[in-house]
Image (cartoon, rainbow, N blue to C red):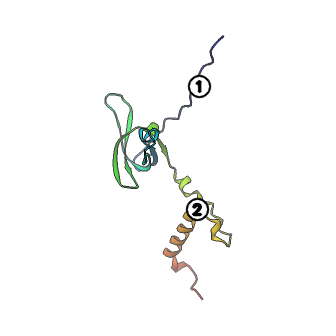
Amino acid sequence: MAQQPQIQAVQPQIRYIKGDIVLFRNVEKFWLGKSGHTFVGRVERSWRHVDTGKVLYDLTELGSLSYRAGIDPDYMRPLPAADAMHDIDTAPLSEPDTGAMTPAAVAWLRQHLAQDRSTLPAPR
C-alpha cells in the first residue's frame, strides 16, 4: 500500500518594512502557558542572521515600548491598517443608537468632532 504524501500548510514569505505594525507570539511562552506571549509591535529594522541566513526583525513592543531584537518572522503576522480601521469605516452612522457602533468607532467620532467643532453648527 502506497503512503499518502503529507501536506503541510506553508505561510507565504512576507517582507516587513520599518514602521509596519505586526502581531508577534513568543512561541516558547505560548506553549508553556505563560502570560505575555503575544504583543503588538512596530518593525524597527530587519537583518540577516550570520549563521542561519534567516531574516530576523527588531520590534518595539507598543504596549511597553520595549525593544525586542531577533524576532523570527514565522511568529509574526501583519496588522493591516484596513483591518484596524474596519469598525470605523463600516460604522452604522445612520443608526440613532451609538450602541450599534463599536467603542473604537464612537471614540474616533468623538475625537474627530472635538477637533472640528468649527465646522459644526452652533448648539441651540
Q: Residue at x 50, y 49 (%)?
A: 79
Residue extending furthest toward the top: 1
**Mark 2 or mark 1, which is nearer the start of the sequence?**
1
x and y percentages locating residue 31 in the rendered image: 46, 38
Amino acid found under the numbered disc labelled 2: Ile
> Viewer-nearest of labels 1 and 2?
1
Residue extending furthest toward the left: 50
Tag 1: Cα neighbours inside 10 Å, few (<14), some, or many (≥20)?
few
Q: Is residue 112 left or right of residue 67?
A: right
Q: Which mark is residue 40?
A: none
Dots 1 and 2: beta carbons under 8 Å? no
- Indicate whether 119 appears above or below 13: below
x and y percentages locating residue 8 in the rendered image: 56, 27
- Indicate whether 7 appears above or below 86: above
x and y percentages locating residue 62 in the rendered image: 40, 54
Q: Which mark is residue 88?
A: 2
- Tell me the quadrant of the picture where the C terminus can be found: bottom right
Q: Quadrant of residue 4?
A: top right
Q: Quadrant of residue 52?
A: top left
Tag 2: Cα neighbours inside 10 Å, few (<14), some, or many (≥20)?
many
Q: How many marks?
A: 2
Amino acid found under the numbered disc labelled 1: Ile
Considering the numbered disc 2 on the image, is that residue within a helix, a strand or a loop? helix
Q: Is residue 21 left or right of residue 60?
A: right
Q: Which mark is residue 7?
A: 1
Q: Residue at x 34, y 51 (%)?
A: 66
Considering the numbered disc 1 on the image, is that residue within a helix, a strand or a loop? loop
- Marks 1 and 2 sit apart, C-alpha to C-alpha, by 39 Å
- Tell me the quadrant of the picture where the N terminus can be found: top right
Residue extending furthest toward the bottom: 124
x and y percentages locating residue 96 in the rendered image: 68, 73
